Amino acid sequence: MAVLPQTARRAAGIKDGARTTARATPYLFVLPYILVFLLFRLGPSLAGLGISLTNWQAVGSPQWVGLRNFEAMLLRDTVFGVALRNTLVFSVITVPVLLVMGLMLALFLNQRMRGRAVGRVAVFTPYVVMSTVVGVVWTWILDKDFGLLNAYTGVATPWLVSERFALAGIILATVWWTVGYNMVLFLAGLQDIPEELYEAARIDGANTVNAFRFVTLPMLAPTMFVVLMLTIINSFQIFDQVYVMTSGGPGTATLTLVQYIYTQSFQYQKFGYGSAIAVVLFLILVVVAIFQTRAYRRGLEGVS
Amino acid sequence: MSKRTLSRIAWYAVLVVVIVLALAPIAWMLTTSLKPESEIISTGIQWIPQTFTLEHFQSILNRYPMAQWTLNSLIVSTAATLLVLLLDSLAGYAFARMQFRGRGILFTIILSMLFVPIQITVVPLFILFSRMGLTDTYWAMILPAGANVTGVFLMRQFFLSVPAELEEAARIDGASSLRIWWSVVLPLARPALTAVAILTFLSTWNSFFWPLIVTRTDAARTLPVGIAQFLSLRPGMVQGQQSIGQSMAGAALAAFLPIIVFVVLQRYFIEGIARSGIKG
Amino acid sequence: MRKPILAILIVVLSVLLSVGVGLAQEPVTLEFWGGWTGPDGTIMQELVDEYNAANPGVQVNLSVQQWSPLFDQFIAAGSAQQAPDIMSMHPQEIAQFVELGLIEPVTELVATSEVYTEDAYLPKAWELQFYNDTMYGLPFDLGVHGVYYNVDLFEAAGIEEFPTNQEEMLEAMRLLTLDADGNHPGDEGFDPENIVQYAINMHTNHHAFYQWYALYNQLGGELLSEDGTQCVMDTDKATQAWQWLQDLVYVHYAAPQGQTDYARDFLTGRTAMLVDGPWQIPAMEAAAEESGFNWATAGYPTIFDEPATWGSGHTFTLPVYGDPDKREAAVDFIEWLGSNSLGWLASGQLPVRHDVIESEGYGELVGRDAFVETLQYQELLPNIPKFNEIFAANAPSPMNVMGQRIILENADIRTEVEAACSAITGILSIP
């Protein structure tokens, strides 16, 4: 990798004649993106970090409060604790389900059978429907009195109107909506596994289960890593469905971290406090990513 | 019956179950939208409406500018996608092929933003666009979408994976870097561009949190925001009568376009999405 | 060779700027913001269209979205020293925006206006517009909880007079609740698992605590201390008020548990009564026209000592950062709205002007009187700067959490009341 760009640069330098142009070229290429990135991503992120250290209602000058927002959040705000717990529960259930179901669907629809393309399209279709539509439709499907789900089960489960079931309702809708995405990522991973490996395994006398264990799983590890990372990031940031289906209720039963950020910043207009919660969410994601990357590296070492 | 036939039958049985489960909610939405309100809340499961009616579609289109919301969503998503393709193919190419000071640190900073929840940026962005007088405009949604991270990452990964011989040849022929990028690199990058285009379009099309905050009128309001604000079935979200039929008709209208586009272009969609995961 | 960089910079910046400046205007354009996302939004748009047609020199642009994001935009715009020309809100929200420095007194306007004069308005409507003895809002309408009832079901149950006190109410509700075999609660063989008709609805959203607030006021309870720094809820009275609502569901079986669509259930005869605001009137009128639905209204019942009912309303305010050159036009438009508010009544909202109430057009409307008669007992939530943190709808505010836990989870009332009260004091104690 290191060789090519250098050759390229040398070639460019020679042909363009002017050294300065050659040196400026890479910057010109990245500049448009960097400008937009600075203005609309990095800049606002850093500003958000700054706002989290203030007490600010957007009007007037921000009042510096140091880490007091974080102190209040972690030590006194019981609602924050509830939001954190709900987010963890949601993720701990959703992530494995989405991973296992996505993988199973991918294995299933990777079989050389007629009609598998139809299956793939069907499973992926929910994902192209926008999340707020998913929320509206599932609110109706989960209706306690006239909903489709309760009509089939024959039990009037109070899906979105009880603390016990509300989060489960959101999880159902989310799994339905996103499992197709994971399936497609796994399908791609499966198709990258060379057929020879399976043949070799077969010659060694491995049955289907063993082939899965010793060929598919290890070869799928990189895909698994990506899918896991994406699913975790998305799970921790769940908002749309919650906003549309329950707004965090009943009580605080489906209040997630992002919904709580929305509440504090945009319903209570406490922008400093809302930003502080967002910073904590960021820290959580970083910690998860570090742990996961470590585990992944260790796993790779174990395999090789 | 042979074991082979049996397993075939089993496979198809599972396939049917999978397809039904995946599509049932969409079908139910459509059925509901075509039933008169009295039939909607009759108990018992009616997959085929006894009386077909288009009244919900009529009243929803009369009451809310769904076409305008859809158009807004299309414009914003298309513009954002074009912007991202331009910026990210330039930047991704530079990060993969060119050597320059600060490349490593710059790329690391960009990637680290993957973990920064966009909610942290929303307040400052909001103030920024207010000061520019650009709230409730397409720009407020297009520009932040241009700062997307995955696109740059995917483009870079792609350029790292293809050999540079063609570019070398062009360079020896005396083409400038920009020219090489345009006439040699971009045509080569079609698969990666497709992937980035689909991902960007889907995520902008689906984007909700930021447009919810930054739009105010139908002139800029996108479809997800319109749906959530006016068609929510959650009690208390919309004051006054909530009609399930109307909400489902609105949902069906909003779901129709992307589903059609997806079914027609499904090969590109699935390949595009798949590509986003391979080179992790 | 920096030129290309500069060129790109200039292009990007000029695009940004040109879009920002490109708001060309020939007639005076007025920005008018409101949160009417229901059918009332359509009616307001019609009024605005009517005004625009009659005043070619002025173009009023109505922006409608849910109140919460609307206020966010108002505040953000304010931070950039911008604002709409007319901002709508509820009277109980005035304090917040005064404290944020975003709306200004209407004292001068009222001193010279021929439309907004004290004697033209119901006293209640007028007095709600004050904060710290200064008038900030111009009243447009009011809304209170009342009761819609299904006349046919009342007749079938043999109830002739609408119940007026707790005892009569309980008996009426018993008669209006039916299981599949036609038994009432308390009858032998009554099956609470198989109820086909309930007497009344029970809110599972923020309107649950709105109802509680009325009942708590019927008991003479106070929520906040005089200086607004702490919760002074009387636990006994608070519990008693909640108990009434909770028992309707879990003891008397008079209201369904976990109800989600109150209007639908009432219109289909699943409940015989509907407690809600006047904004349901259009739906009732439509049902009466379509299927002959036989409905009538009554004031919110006095279950305890004194009459009281939850209420709110819509108010116009003048933002501090509104364009001063457009102020005159804005005032002209609000005055026009005020004196042409009869059209607005189609939304169900209640009139606040004497001349409207006495007009022929109002006399032809049905169902409003019962609401209007109780306007004098209207109790608004306290108009305090931290209103949202305590009372926000569709948010985990202490009041909302208390209500949902008590109504949906059958939670222990005393515990919830105490938890809410200490949460409120916690919020108020932070400067």
Image: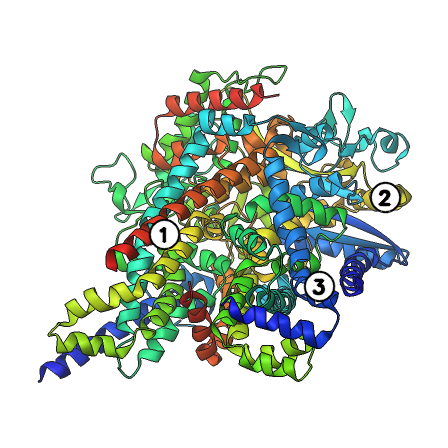
C25 left or right, relative to B236: right
Amino acid type, callout 1: Ile
Give SS at disc 3: helix
SS for dot 1 = helix
Q: Do the residues at discs 3 and 1 belong to one chain?
A: yes
Q: At x 78% / y 24%, what residue is drawn?
A: C134
Q: Residue A232: image x %, image y %?
A: 40, 51
Which is more toward the observer, C164 or B236?
B236
**Compared with residue B79, is residue A146 higher up or lower down, i.e. above or below?**
above
Question: In this orientation, does residue C197 appear?
Answer: no
Q: Nearer the viewer, mark 3 or mark 2?
A: 3
C397, B93: nearer the viewer: B93
Q: What chain does badge 3 belong to? A: A
Q: Which mark is residue C406?
A: none
Compare residues C163 and B180 and report the one nearer the observer: B180
Amino acid type at image mark 2 = Asp
Badge 3 is on which residue? A24
Q: Which comes sooner in the sequence, label 3 or label 1?
A: 3
Q: CA distance from mark 3 to mark 2?
A: 47 Å
Q: Which residue is mark 1?
A: A171
* Dots 3 and 2 on the same chain: no
Which callout, 3 or 1, points to the residue nearer the camera? 3
* Residue at image location 49% in from the left, 52% down from the top: A240
**Which residue type does callout 3 highlight?**
Ala
Quadrant occupied by the C terminus of chain C: top right
Q: Residue at x 35, y 78 (%)?
A: A118
Q: Are marks 1 and 2 in contact (CB under 8 Å)?
A: no
For mark 2, name the chain: C
Q: Please give the residue where the numbered disc 2 appears in the rendered image.
A: C323
Residue A253 visible in the current orientation:
yes
The subunit letter for the residue under badge 1 reads: A
